[in-house]
Amino acid sequence: MGAASRREPFRYVMNQPIDCWLELPAGSTSPGAGQQTEGVLLDLSRSGCKVRSSLNVRFTSKDTRIIIHFKLNENMLRFTGSVRWGWMYGLGEYQYGVRLDLTPEEEDILTSELDLWTMTSSQEDS
């Protein structure tokens, strides 16, 4: 399979999970809506990410919205997405796959931040 046939963007796995904050939008009917909960970002691509947190989203449809805040490089980023899957990871811990709903501007920002993060990470590993 050639690179041209790839449909999904590359997923960047964080060797050291990145601290993040998860927030359910204020209009959400879930408990804790509008409040931030700590979590970790496990992997990231231009189309989505995997996160782990004590936040129990209790989603019943693919329309559960979530806002993810995290610092990559020196910039604080904030993106909105939809929870696509989730399961209990351990006692009081949940893991979620989130599809990011990025504007073209946000996609450009994330792409440049991921490029910079990749260069910085490879220099640190050398």
Image (cartoon, rainbow, N blue to C red):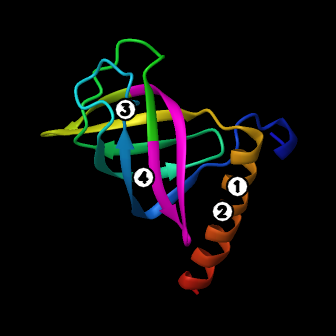
Q: Amino acid at mark 3?
A: Leu
Quadrant of the image containing the N terminus: top right
Q: CA distance from mark 2 to mark 3?
A: 24 Å
From the viewer's perspective, tell me whether residue 14 is left or right of residue 5.
Answer: left
For label 3, count other residues whose C-alpha is less than 10 Å away and answer few (under 14), some (14-19) or many (20+).
many
From the viewer's perspective, tell me whether residue 90 is left or right of residue 43.
Answer: left
The residue singled out by tag 4 in the image is 41
- Of residues 101 and 121, the one drawn nearer to the viewer in this rendering: 101
State the mark number for residue 24: 3
Badge 2 element: helix
State if disc 1 and disc 3 touch (CB < 8 Å).
no
Badge 4 element: strand
Indicate which disc, 4 or 1, sits on the residue closer to the N terminus: 4
Badge 1 element: helix
Indicate which disc, 4 or 2, sits on the residue closer to the N terminus: 4
For label 2, count other residues whose C-alpha is less than 10 Å away and answer few (under 14), some (14-19) or many (20+).
some
The residue singled out by tag 1 in the image is 109
Q: Amino acid at mark 1?
A: Ile
